[in-house]
Amino acid sequence: MRDKELLKALSKLLSQSGILLSADIDTEALKGVNIDALSAKIIELNQGASTVTIVDADMLRSALSKLEAESASKVPAPVEVKRSSDFKPIAAAVEAEYQIKNRPSDRAEGSVSDFVAYFRSRLSRIKEILSSHRSYVITQSIDNIKNFMSGREVVVAGILTNRITTKNGNIMVVMEDETGEAKIMFMNNTSADGKKLFNSASRLINDEVVAVKGKISGPFIIAKEIVWPDVPIRERKAMEDDIAIAFMSDIHIGSKLFMKKNFTKMLSWLNGGVDTKSRELAGKIKYIIMGGDVVDGIGVYPDHDRDLAVLDIYSQYQMLAEYIEAIPDYIHVFVLPGNHDAVQRAEPQPPFPEELLDIKLSNVHMVSNPSTLMLHKLNVLTYHGTSLDSIISSIPGLSYSKPEEAMLELLKRRHLSPVYGGNIIVPTQTDNLVIDEVPDIMHMGHIHKNGLLEYHGVQVVNSGTWQDRTDFQVRQGHIPTPCNLPVFEAKRYSFTTIDFTGVV
């Protein structure tokens, strides 16, 4: 806000409680101040006043001073991490092997031509994936089939731009490619195959790229089969080194609900300072991936400051840095942003800049959201998962209680954010949210709910949260699973979840 706008906003908030601002208020004092918090403090200081209160420069300085002192007192002191001198971690003797593939976040003007290029990129890249399906050959472009006789069988591929249910109860979708559009009909018939196809059609979403096999019937294609890009069935990789990868996300440092005691206990566990049966597993951890929303941020939603223990964004990241620095130096840590973090909201999100999160340690790496990490030959696709909201609301049967199922739908569509408008994207010349390479592990967060499954050899994991249940989640009936740390053991090729909820 500009100076006059800050003054106007403060005056409006105070006037609702019968408090006026003096004409001698210096607007310089309001720069960088949370106006909502300041007005609340002034109102608090003047409760019970019998006359109309006029806030002068001295009263403003007093309120600002008290607000600053309270904010400083709310910054939790880092809890000391316990370390064990007799801890001999296996991973300390293993040399790190990693590669980082950030997703570029090129600048775009958001013009019509930018969006056209973006969706053409999505179409061509996913059509290439569809073309790798040996059982299906995309016969013609949509423009070429317009002159085909009724009854001719075709396989077409394109972007779905609309889906409706007709008055007869059938599903019609509009598909576009570079040459034109086609209307595809899914008949609601009673045969077993017909019901199966119709149910599949109900899971089609706008802006995804699929292929459809069917027959020409006048102006329509009567569908017989839907072909999603999907992933091929693959064998598990044989891993030599007995190392492990720990996954976490949605730490929300700075929130009043950040479970710092549990988080600190987890850090002590990494240092061998917790005597548990899983101590040997702690010693295998060579890599940690922090999947976004690492701090709670500032102003993410209305009245956000009421839920914050730390009102300064830089203090939140400083606390995060102190926690990360407590991780043993043989463990490599990869940190990506999420929708609560102080980087651009549109995806792909760039890595944290040094002025925000400056950790000068060779084992700590800032990466983009999303990004691909090659860890000891394992291809790990990590993405915060903001698009899970739109995919859950678009496909029948999905819910926040099983985030892994929503993640699977993204994997089958080979795109991290297929629904345009459900998540803010950067319309670059190349759609950098396409899943070109099939990962060995697909990791997300955002939902605050742990989830695991394996699909065609791909390990799908949602790493939950380190924040207690919020009022919003209570109203929605959503039950998070805080302080559950999923750990992937490479040699065993399986996950173990360590529960830190009952350790404090």
Image: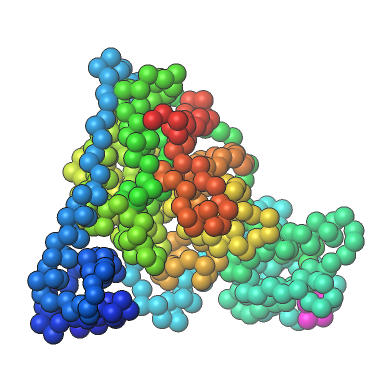
Residue nearest the observer in this picture, 412 or 387:
387
Please give left or right for residue 412 compared with residue 218 in the image.
left
In the figure, 476 relative to 14: above or below?
above
Q: Quadrant of residue 458?
A: top right
Q: Is residue 460 visible?
A: no
**Residue at the location (28% across, 14% down)?**
86
Q: Quadrant of the N terminus?
A: bottom left
Q: Main secondary structure of the magenta part?
A: strand
Q: Residue furthest top?
A: 86
**Residue 383 spot, x, y in % from top left:** 44, 52
**Residue at the location (72% across, 53% down)?**
135
Please give left or right for residue 268 compared with residue 219 in the image.
left
Query: Which contiguous range is marked in magenta?
Result: 216-220
**Residue at the location (55% across, 47% down)?**
479
Please give left or right for residue 278 compared with residue 91 in the image.
right
**Residue 154 spot, x, y in % from top left:** 76, 68
Q: Is residue 33 visible?
A: yes
**Residue 118 spot, x, y in % from top left:** 47, 71
Q: Residue furthest front?
A: 50
Residue nearest the observer in this picture, 434 or 150:
434
Q: Quadrant of the C terminus?
A: top left
**Residue at the location (55% across, 66% down)?**
419
In the figure, 173 relative to 382: above or below?
below
Residue nearest the observer in this picture, 504 or 121:
504
Q: Quadrant of residue 196?
A: bottom right
**Residue 255 spot, x, y in % from top left:** 34, 51
In the figure, 152 relative to 502: above or below?
below
| 363 falls in the magenta region | no
